Image (tube, coloured by chain):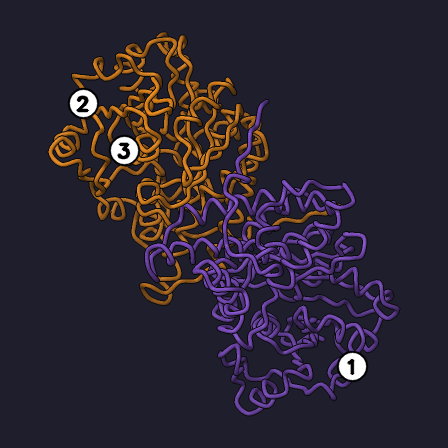
Chain colours: A purple, B orange
Amino acid sequence: MLSGGKFMATITFIGAGQMASALTFPAFENGHEVRLVGTPLDRDIIDGLRRDNFHITLKRTLHNGIHYYQVEEMRDAIDGADAILGGVSSFGVDWFAEEVLPNIPQNVPLISVTKGMIDQEDGSMQTYPEFWESTEAGSKLNINAIGGPCTSYELADKDDSAVTFCGRDIETLRYLKGLFTTDYYHVSLSTDVVGVECAVALKNAYALGVSLAVGLAEKREGIGVLHYNSQAALFGQGVREMRKLLNLVGGGDDNIVLGAGDLYVTVFGGRTRKIGTLLGQGLSFEDAMAELAGVTLESIVIATRTARAVKKLVTAGKVNAADFPLLLHVDAIINGGEPVNIPWKAFETETVL
Amino acid sequence: MLSGGKFMATITFIGAGQMASALTFPAFENGHEVRLVGTPLDRDIIDGLRRDNFHITLKRTLHNGIHYYQVEEMRDAIDGADAILGGVSSFGVDWFAEEVLPNIPQNVPLISVTKGMIDQEDGSMQTYPEFWESTEAGSKLNINAIGGPCTSYELADKDDSAVTFCGRDIETLRYLKGLFTTDYYHVSLSTDVVGVECAVALKNAYALGVSLAVGLAEKREGIGVLHYNSQAALFGQGVREMRKLLNLVGGGDDNIVLGAGDLYVTVFGGRTRKIGTLLGQGLSFEDAMAELAGVTLESIVIATRTARAVKKLVTAGKVNAADFPLLLHVDAIINGGEPVNIPWKAFETETVL
């Protein structure tokens, strides 16, 4: 549809969480019709938005003119859409497969902000786009995803944000970029779906790892005392292990650019830093989780899944456990009840040309 | 020399600045005889240390038992040494070549903490170890260097720190590691001198680049307001450009682990962050430097040299300027008087497998 000389598309957002809702800013400002559909968990969010456009968890007022839908109205919201944005969390991936994918017309591209991977029985890792493509409804769809360092609050505040849209078809990606890119939302494109999704999923586990140093320094010297040598050492080790994992899943090496950027933003990004800091201070995993009661911690899910995959590959003789000391220590802390005891000496390397 | 069953070596530190002085902690605690020699610029530091072991710029009390020397006493300090640690800044590299190298016996290994590179007429980059090896006195010596994310204050405070010792001979590196490694000072080894030194030198330019985002956010929303999306976007772009520069100088790709870790610590490391923040707030380079009067800014030197080398290579048709938009923008700000205007769209990429 043309409106005032400018192409206007209709974009339906499914999931009204913080990230999807933040993405309504660039979409609406580009002149598109924006339809925001809540999941069954977003009922209060949609009620609030209908009242006064204020998003109760993003804590920002969305643009006036966005259309809001409860989950029962999803089909109406999808009707006539030019593109669908999927905005559920890792915990809504199955719901999205069962309740949303069958409602999406085959000619309408889907782009998802959900970050994460699923570990398989054989130790291989599956991206969410791959998982959705493996379902009957998803197999007929054009499924794309968004990776890269971008937190919702800062996007809503128009802080310059650089992301990567990934998918199988570069023309689709260019179309989707055209819908969303603005002077503060910067979009790279990549058909290396596994590489992009792996890089941005893994960083969760390593952000928790880096945050352990924040808590360790506070345990030693008092709350609020910051040291960066130890954080940087863990950051570097995280980059090293992420490069090895990227190689393992067949993702391009240049995706470490995304992994490192996303690791950076996540280390400063609230919940993951908080749990890592509490663990570093000496709290048990149970006590740390209790302090964060009620918040969803995708980093825990991702760290657990990645470690499980790596451990299976170690058992199968396909990878060396010594290549992943930080990941395995994070796993031992959150899933094995072990105290924090960073294996510093295991990070030391010897390179002889 | 054996002392209480433990091997004790004699290590002579030349340069009593913050980094070299911080390294006296692990060396002394390992039971070595430590001799700390000031440069002509360190006269007050040595006077202070002789009085009460308090280091006036590191602001820490060194171990009682370290021997202090003024520059005139350098030969006495070198006499009988098992290893020399070179601790001058980038600005002391020539002095070190002329006044120190001729005094070092050929069989005594040297390890330097000076970070940086020198750009040549043809656009190639030379590491400091290579520069020293190119002098007559240096050509006969076994010259090694320390890279990696480690700030002096935090090392002095025993925050866990991971560094890499690099040099041509792995046996020498293992010997030097034995002298310095402790339960908080973690040492990797590499014979890829160019890769290690390049990675840790480049990060200075990019740390300044990332810090621009700190100032831009403050300019927009007020002093103290922090946003991380834009920092992370610049961090990722810095990693991307550093990987390309590493490739250009023939350094191993895995050195990006050091580059990323060192970039992380430097973004939070005081002077470089301060100048980047002031520039991002809108100050001219001259005004920003005036606010930091009297401090040495190696990041400015490194950014200038690296950009100069890259520009020569662009002119020679050997590299593409479009691959280094952040470096060239930082250079334009500090050497061309240009205002901060991050070339965000130049960072966007398209990857088609």
Work out whether disc 1 and disc 3 sit on a shared chain. no
Q: Give the camera-side residue of B118 and B42.
A: B42
Q: CA distance from mark 2 to mark 1?
A: 82 Å
Q: Residue at x 29, y 52 (%)?
A: B283
| Figure quadrant of the C terminus of chain B | top right
At mark 3, the secondary structure is helix
Give me the C-alpha separation between circle 2 and circle 3: 13 Å
Question: Which secondary structure, mark 1?
Answer: loop
Q: Residue at x 49, y 78 (%)?
A: A60
- Location of residue B241 in the rendering, given as x and y in whole percent from the top left corner: 53, 40
Q: Is residue A215 above or below residue A67?
A: above
Closer-to-camera residue (B28/B312): B28
On screen, residue A235 above or below A34: above
Q: Position of residue B281 (x, y in %)?
A: 33, 57
Which circle's residue, 2 or 3, is located before the other in the chain? 3
Decide if residue B153 is on the left or right side of residue B330.
left
Q: Name the residue that disc number 1 marks.
A: A79
Task: Return the residue nearer the eye: A24 or B340.
Answer: A24
Residue B267 percent location from the top left of the image: 40, 48
Q: Chain of mark 3?
A: B
**Image quadrant in which you'd find residue A298:** bottom right
Q: Residues within 10 Å of mark 3 (few under 14, many from 20)?
A: many
Give the numbered dot on residue B69: 2
- Residue B284 image offset from top left, x and y in percent: 30, 49
- Residue at mark 2: chain: B
In this rendering, does residue A28 appear at all? no
The amino acid type found where label 3 is placed reads: Ser
- The local crowd at label 2, few if under 14, some if 14 to 19, many if 20 or more residues have their Cα within 10 Å, is many
Q: Which residue is mark 3?
A: B21
